[in-house]
Image (cartoon, coloured by chain):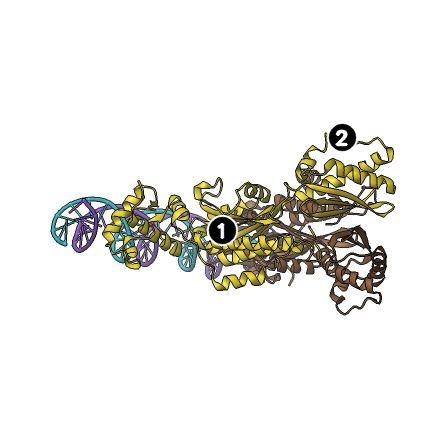
Chain colours: A brown, B yellow, C purple, D cyan
Amino acid sequence: MDLSERQLQILQAIINDYVENAEPVGSRSIAKRYDLGVSPATIRNEMSDLEEMGYLTHPHTSAGRVPSDKAYRLYVNTLMKKKNLSAKDKRLINDRLQASRDEFDATIRHAAELLSEITHLTSFALTPATNEETIAFIRLLPVDERTIILMIVGESGNITNTTMRLKVPYTQDALDLLSKNMTVTYKGRTLDDVLKSHIIEDVGTDIEALSSLRGSVMPGFLRTLEEMLNVNLYMEGMTNIFNLPEYSSIDRARDFMQLFAQKDWFTQKMLQRADGVVVTIGDENTKMKDCTLITATYHVDGKLVGKIGVIGPTRMKYDEVTSLMEYLTNNLSESFRLTDGTDGEEKKE
Amino acid sequence: MDLSERQLQILQAIINDYVENAEPVGSRSIAKRYDLGVSPATIRNEMSDLEEMGYLTHPHTSAGRVPSDKAYRLYVNTLMKKKNLSAKDKRLINDRLQASRDEFDATIRHAAELLSEITHLTSFALTPATNEETIAFIRLLPVDERTIILMIVGESGNITNTTMRLKVPYTQDALDLLSKNMTVTYKGRTLDDVLKSHIIEDVGTDIEALSSLRGSVMPGFLRTLEEMLNVNLYMEGMTNIFNLPEYSSIDRARDFMQLFAQKDWFTQKMLQRADGVVVTIGDENTKMKDCTLITATYHVDGKLVGKIGVIGPTRMKYDEVTSLMEYLTNNLSESFRLTDGTDGEEKKE
DNA sequence: TGTTAGCACTCGCCTTGTTAGAGTGCTAAT
DNA sequence: ATTAGCACTCTAACAAGGCGAGTGCTAACA
């Protein structure tokens, strides 16, 4: 059932050739271009066997062979060798990816830009998912008679704050009390959990002033949690696919573009994918059945997890793209390691 | 030189027909569909004259006529009548556009969504430009030994704040002094102005502790200003154009898509456009020579100005689109009027 | 003088037919 | 097991002919 050495060689040759030229490859051109020491006729026989096994397909009788999803899967799993980035690409990345915790979103977006620029495919990047983040403490700070600042500090060091204008004045005592009260109630719980359960919650409200203040603060508190949980999606290089022959038909191009029209759906799908470099090819995807999707994860302080990804036709340079993505995510994770105050300041948008 | 009444009627008929069917319209079909009381031959003669004057063009000898940019311009300027929104559209807008100052970005995005949904074209929305915003005061609030919050309050009521981690501890006195110091220096000046001129500025730094604190705070201050000045661009319905015959060629579709690849360029262009409902047709645009671009402005507290817009082929329902945009922007401006605290809280992202 | 009917003419599009080329699959020889 | 040879298949490209929509012109008409 296993493929012979020669079959593997031929399959690899076909994949190489097809990835390069995007045209069905015939037995003759394989024999000419790759020195396998056999004649086209022999290659034809092997090709026929490979087709029977599902590794190749045939657009029509008198056309060359095209690798199937199964072939790419085999290639990615066993045939493919890790590729070293070119010096040029490395330089490009090091120059442009001035990652810093202060400029989270900008850094992530740059990563996506680089990804699409180097691969000539469509790329995306997600800011880290914070649904695992837990609350360390909550503080309410006075500004003026009617204005306060709500500050939510996460256990991984995230700090988010919001200005709130209250309907009624407040007292410093009530403010302090509510801060403590909220901290006690929510400390150690995830943002997600707090947001979902807040309705049935019953934070002690025996004191009159406190109860009133709490009523004013809660809507803003919940909205801020929601905003913290939001994951931003950046897409780059959408129009790159217009240069690829597989999208020369308007229908294909439209289908591709429409995938990204529903950003929320797309974001959810991406968040569900496993960690590390993950490749799904053609039919392995629920939608986008003739695309390959490659995602990789980066880490923030080794904890929070964000994703970057590349989308293109199944015909792509798997070795180069996966190596690039590994390099990029390592780079990002390194930059996003908590340097503990030495960078002077920190901000979470 | 002016067009006769009959010529105007014929031109209007041609525009109607062409906007509807996207096909060159012939003299016979005009005579049949519109009751002008003249024969096709007469219409042919008039068409010939209109063509000579530049209002119509001719794809080839034996095809019907197509309105030129000049014809659309005439239509928009003088022929077009204001259209009432359909009850269905009005309901849609009122249901979905729950505008509120608290959810600025979300509201803007919804507006763009509605716009593309109703017109079946591509739409966009820009968050308000804040380069005219002036600083009311600046305050630094203590959090813990190493952490402070920087708060920038604009004169139109915007409040933005950022958490900053300092390299060295600070004293309450230094904090208060620097707050006052910065407020005095920057009060009444626009964000833009402060950001651009900060280098040559010389805020008094005779006191040692103050100087050190200031050194830590300034980078974050400038970054925050920059972020406040950022205008967000939301695009919706990009794939709508795939349903239009003018974009059935892959090249056209690509050109269209690539317009929006450089978001920064696009944003700048849109910000430069005049206020109110502005229509630019075909050649009147620098790039996108066969598109029509319609923008409209909404106001925040009657002061800050944001934009929404629609992009499509020159063949579009000008009357409906412009009426819709007027309705939408009025609606937005109304919702964004400062209600002075009665909505409980306020936030600027 | 403006309007209309009639008719020849133009031109793009669709269909059909033909050809060249690439590549396979089979068979028989090695 | 491998290979050369050859018939066969299918597509892409090009050419020719017919169709139909629409114009432009001319001559007749109110």
From what the image shows, is residue A200 above or below residue B78?
below
For residue A65, say whether it is visible.
no
Q: Nearer the viewer, residue B184 or B268?
A: B184
The quarter of the displayed image where residue B129 is located: top right
Where disc 2 sits, the SS reads loop
Report which residue position mark 2 lands on.
B202
Task: Give residue B222's position: percent from left, percent from top.
Answer: 73, 39
Specify whether B322 is left or right of B40: right
Residue B189 seen from this side: yes
Label 1 amino acid? Ser
**From what the image shows, is residue C26 above or below residue B278?**
below
Q: Nearer the viewer, residue B270 or B328?
A: B328
Q: Position of residue B114 (x, y in %)?
A: 54, 57
Name the image quarter holding residue B28.
bottom left
Q: Which chain is mark 2 on?
A: B
> In the image, residue B59 lies at what x, y percent?
34, 46
Give the left or right position of residue B296, taking residue A185 as reference: left
Tell me which residue sits at (58%, 54%) in the image.
B334
Instruction: Please tell me whether mark 1 or mark 2 is closer to you in this view.
Output: 2
Q: Are marks 1 and 2 on the same chain?
A: no
In x, y percent, where is residue A266?
63, 58
Q: Are marks 1 and 2 in contact (CB under 8 Å)?
A: no
Q: Amino acid at mark 2?
A: Asp
Q: Which mark is residue A108?
A: none
Q: Number of marks in the image?
A: 2
Which subunit holds the residue at mark 1?
Answer: A
Numbered disc 1: secondary structure: loop
* Left or right: where A206 falls relative to B269: right
Residue beneath disc 1 = A248
Q: Relative to the observer, which residue lies in front, C23 or B268?
A: B268
